[in-house]
Image (cartoon, rainbow, N blue to C red):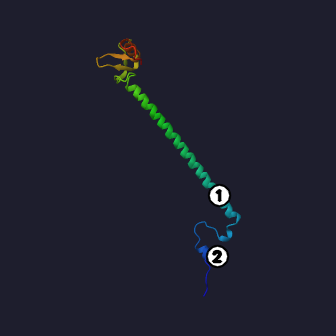
């Protein structure tokens, strides 16, 4: 009766998995070169993933900053400095100075004023409120 050793050449070649080397070849320079190559590829991929995470974090921070600034601008557009809601705006002609502006206020009583005319009128009526 012949007993086969589990690591004999024929059996080892038959049951070899993937790129695992023969036990005799572990110290071979080609095997060490292969392992060094795999090591360098994994290090490179790790650096690429790390750089990707850093870039994603920076983009998330910039996006949050932009959203905060947009929210502040929207609040400035919708509310006057004294906290009251701003009247509706549109492009048109100011009734006081007769100039055309991109934004004029439409007041409920029918008057249309540009921002500078509104400032002067609000300063006359309430000197503490400055736009």
Q: Percent x, y for residue 7?
A: 62, 75
User: How many discs appear?
Assistant: 2
Q: Nearer the viewer, residue 74 or 103?
A: 74
Q: Residue at x 57, y 48 (%)?
A: 50
Sooner in the amino-acid sequence: mark 2 or mark 1:
2
In the displayed orientation, state which residue is furthest to the bottom. 1
When asked about the image quadrant of residue 68, the answer is top left
In the displayed orientation, state which residue is furthest to the left. 109
In the displayed orientation, state which residue is furthest to the front. 128
Residue tagged by mark 1? 37
- SS for dot 1: helix
- The quadrant of the rendering that contains the N terminus is bottom right
- SS for dot 2: helix
Give the Cα separation between the discs numbered 2 and 1: 27 Å
The answer to whether the residues at label 2 and label 1 have Cβ atoms under 8 Å apart is: no
Residue 24 visible here: yes
23 relative position to 101: left or right: right
Q: Percent x, y for residue 123?
A: 39, 13
111 relative position to 35: left or right: left
Residue 99 visible here: no
Against 58, is 73 above or below? Answer: above
Q: Percent x, y for residue 82?
A: 38, 21
When asked about the image quadrant of residue 81, the answer is top left
Q: Percent x, y for residue 87?
A: 34, 22
Please tell me how crowded label 1 is: few (under 14), some (14-19), or many (20+) other residues with Cα within 10 Å: few
Disc marking residue 114: none
Residue tagged by mark 2? 9
- The quadrant of the rendering that contains the C terminus is top left
């Amino acid at each position: 009766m012949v007993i086969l050793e589990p690591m004999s050449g024929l059996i080892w070649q038959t049951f070899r998995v993937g790129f695992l080397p023969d036990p005799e070849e572990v110290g071979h320079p080609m095997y060490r070169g292969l392992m060094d190559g795999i090591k360098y590829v994994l290090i490179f991929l790790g650096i690429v993933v790390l750089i990707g995470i850093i870039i994603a974090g920076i983009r998330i921070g910039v996006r949050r900053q932009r959203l905060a600034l947009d929210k502040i601008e929207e609040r400035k557009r919708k509310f006057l400095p004294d906290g009251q809601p701003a009247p509706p705006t549109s492009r048109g002609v100011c009734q006081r100075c007769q100039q055309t502006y991109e934004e004029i206020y439409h007041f409920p009583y029918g008057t249309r004023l540009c921002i500078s005319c509104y400032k002067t009128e609000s300063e006359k009526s309430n000197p503490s409120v400055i736009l």
